[in-house]
Amino acid sequence: MEEIKLAVEARTELGKGASRRLRAAGAIPGVFYGPQAKPVSLTVNAKEFAVNVGNLEGSHLIRLQSSVPELGQRVALLREVQAHPLTGRILHVDLYEVDLTQRLQVTVPLHFVGRARGVAEGGIMQPILREIEVECLPTDIPAFIEVDVSGLAIHDAVHLAEIQLPANVNAVFETNDAVVTVLPPTVEEVKVAAEAVEGAAAEGAAPAEAEAKEGKDSGKGA
C-alpha cells in the first residue's frame, strides 16, 4: 500500500478556546496515539488534510512529517474524524500508530463490478454491505475490494465467504452474511406493468367494439 505523507506539528495549547483559534487559523487539532505511543496533541493544515486525506475512502497508511521526535516518521491510520454536523467542516482528527510488522483489523470498502444477469431480467441489484472488515499487515491493506456481480440471477447473492480477497488478506466475520443480492421486480412495478398490458388490450378492444356496433346499426337501417 502506498503511504500518504502528512505534515503535522505538536501543540501545547489545549482546550476548546485553543482549538477554535487553531481552526480560525486554518488548522485542525488532533491527537496521535497507539498501544506503544504516548498520546501527543498535534495540528495539521486543513487544506493539506483535505487534499491528501479528506477525500479518500477506506484505510490508508499515513507517514507523519514533523521535526518532533514523537511524531516524525511515525506511521498511522486515520482512526476517527469529527466533523461539524451542518457545514461538514473537520473539527478534530485521531491518528492511530500502527506497527508495520503486526497484523491488524480494518474496514475496506466494496466495489461492485459488472452487470448482474438478474438485472437484465428485470431484477434490482441491492447492495447489503458497503464495506467489510479484514485482517492483514498494514502494508497489505487494500484500497478497496472488487465484487463481481455479473453472474447473479434474481434471488442470487454473494456472501462474505465467497468474496475473492487479495493475498495475505482475510475477511473477519462471525456469520456468512450476504453482501449483495438481486431482488425481483417490486410489487408496484409488476402492478404497473399489468395495468399497462390491460390498458393496451382495452385500447385494442375499443375500435373492434365500435366497428361491431356500427355494423349492427347499419343492419337495422337496412
Image (tube, rainbow, N blue to C red):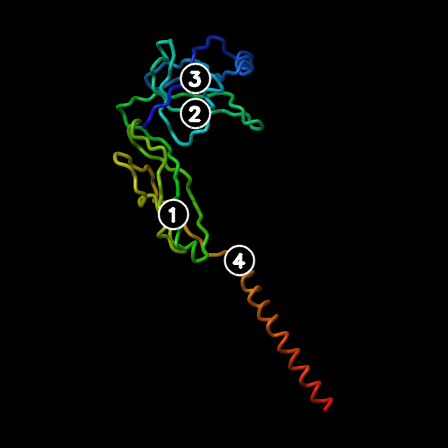
Callout 2: SS: helix
Residue receiving disc 3: 31
> Marks 1 and 2, how far apart in space?
29 Å
Q: Position of residue 148 (x, y in %)?
A: 35, 46
Q: Quadrant of residue 127?
A: top left
> Marks 2 and 4, how far apart in space?
42 Å
Compare residues 93 and 214 and report the one nearer the observer: 214
Kind of residue at badge 4: Glu
Q: Which sits earlier in the primary sequence, circle 4 or circle 1? A: 1
Which mark is in front, 1 or 3?
Answer: 1
> Marks 4 and 1, how far apart in space?
24 Å
Residue drawn at the location 40% of the way across and 31% of the way down: 58
Q: Which sits earlier in the primary sequence, circle 1 or circle 3? A: 3
Neighbourhood count class around disc 3 (C-alpha, 10 Å): few under 14, some 14–19, many 20 upward? some
Residue receiving disc 4: 189
Q: Which mark is residue 53?
A: 2
State which quarter of the image contains the N terminus: top left
- CB under 8 Å between callouts 3 and 2? no
> Marks 4 and 3, how far apart in space?
52 Å
- CB under 8 Å between callouts 4 and 3? no
Which mark is in front, 4 or 1?
Answer: 1
State which quarter of the image contains the C terminus: bottom right
Q: Position of residue 162 (x, y in %)?
A: 31, 45
Q: Residue furthest bottom?
A: 222
Q: Which sits earlier in the primary sequence, circle 3 or circle 2? A: 3
Kind of residue at badge 2: Val
